[in-house]
Image: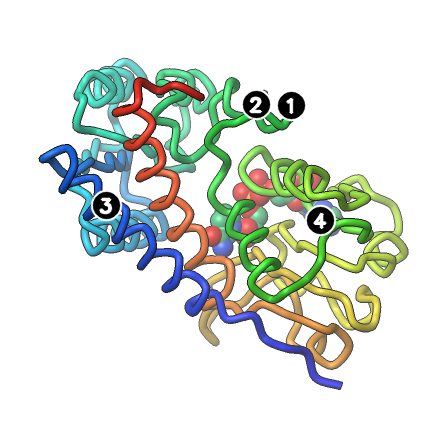
Amino acid sequence: MSAIVIDGRVVARASRDKTAERVREFVRVNGFAPGLATILVGGDPASEVYVRNKRTAAAEAGFVDFHRHLEATASERDVERTIVELAADDTVAGILLQLPLPDGLDRSALIECIPPTKDVDGLTTLSQGRLARGTVGLRPCTPSGIIEMLDFAGIDIAGTNAVVVGRSELVGHPAAELLLRRGATVTISHSQTRDLRSVTSRADILVAAAGIPGLIGAGHVKPGAAVIDVGIHRTENGLVGDVLPEVAEVAGWVTPVPGGVGPMTIATLLSNTIWAAELSIAGGASI
Ligand code: NAD
């Protein structure tokens, strides 16, 4: 058996086209284009690539680019000032603070400087609280992209056993929340989980987000399961994920690396940004 490959580039393309259409409509009605602000602190090479890709995709969809690049030596006050300045600009619909931040900067404190109405990465306490409660709000991009891929593949989430490997604020935990909201029975495994294999092999939907290359092999996977690989690792053989290629012989669906979850993260960032822009014009009514 060989798994169906869920092509993130195809799903992302469709999502980005829809967002571009909404941006055109926004400009037609309001007379200005909404902006996406990306803030990069320091020169982490992977972050530079991610930010560049986000800015290129945003510009292609019709957003105005408000990029700020601060030196690695920037103080917390410098970063805070940058966020506050962007937050005060009515044409900036969304603000994204690229993570990780250089040592010495308090990530949680800085994220809280982003107004919840512009929190297009869904990482503020308010956004995460709304996610936990299931009320309307901006959701983290990568987990939302995972759900969109499952929907695209026609996988009925309700009633499944879903296992998320990883419990980070950025990916694992919110992915588990979203799966729970869609009716899955969810298990979160993490670095202290004993016998990972016995947990993952019960999953109908397995989300691998541990950040460990090749952690998930064929023996971890229930035959026919949908396996979503969030991991991204640069190796001398190119990009690889948390899931070994052999998993495709057992699973029902897999996502490639590259070309799986990564493009969906960007597509969801853009759909979050146009939604934030539309809501801001409507007075931020529901968030
Ligand atoms: P993180 O380091 O913050 O979290 C990793 C999680 O994995 C932790 O909760 C930890 O408890 C768990 N873990 C570690 N070892 C484990 C083990 N042996 N068994 C089970 N769980 C274990 O990482 P993150 O920010 O959540 O990112 C995870 C991966 O996803 C990384 O490779 C990252 O590069 C990638 N990522 C990809 C995208 C994308 O768009 N594709 C977006 C964000 C992150």
Residue at mark 4 to residue at mark 2: CA–CA distance = 23 Å
Residue at the disc numbered 3: 23
Q: Position of residue 123 (x, y in %)?
A: 48, 29
Classed neighbour count for the residue bearing mark 1: other residues with Cα under 10 Å, few (<14), some (14–19), many (≥20): few
Q: Residue at x 15, y 40 (%)?
A: 27
Residue 287 seen by the camera:
no
Q: Which mark is residue 130?
A: 2
Q: Residue at x 69, y 77 (%)?
A: 248
Please, what is the three-letter code of the amino acid marked with disc 2?
A: Arg
Sequence order check, earlier mark of 1 and 3: 3
Residue 239 is left or right of residue 146, and the answer is left
Please, what is the three-letter code of the amino acid marked with disc 4?
A: Val
Q: Is mark 4 within 8 Å of ligand 1?
A: yes
Residue at the disc numbered 1: 133
Please, what is the three-letter code of the amino acid marked with disc 3?
A: Val
Please, what is the three-letter code of the amino acid marked with disc 1?
A: Arg
Front disc: 3 or 2: 3
Residue at mark 1 to residue at mark 2: CA–CA distance = 5 Å
Residue at the disc numbered 4: 165
- Say which element carries label 1: helix
Q: Are marks 3 and 2 in contact (CB under 8 Å)?
A: no
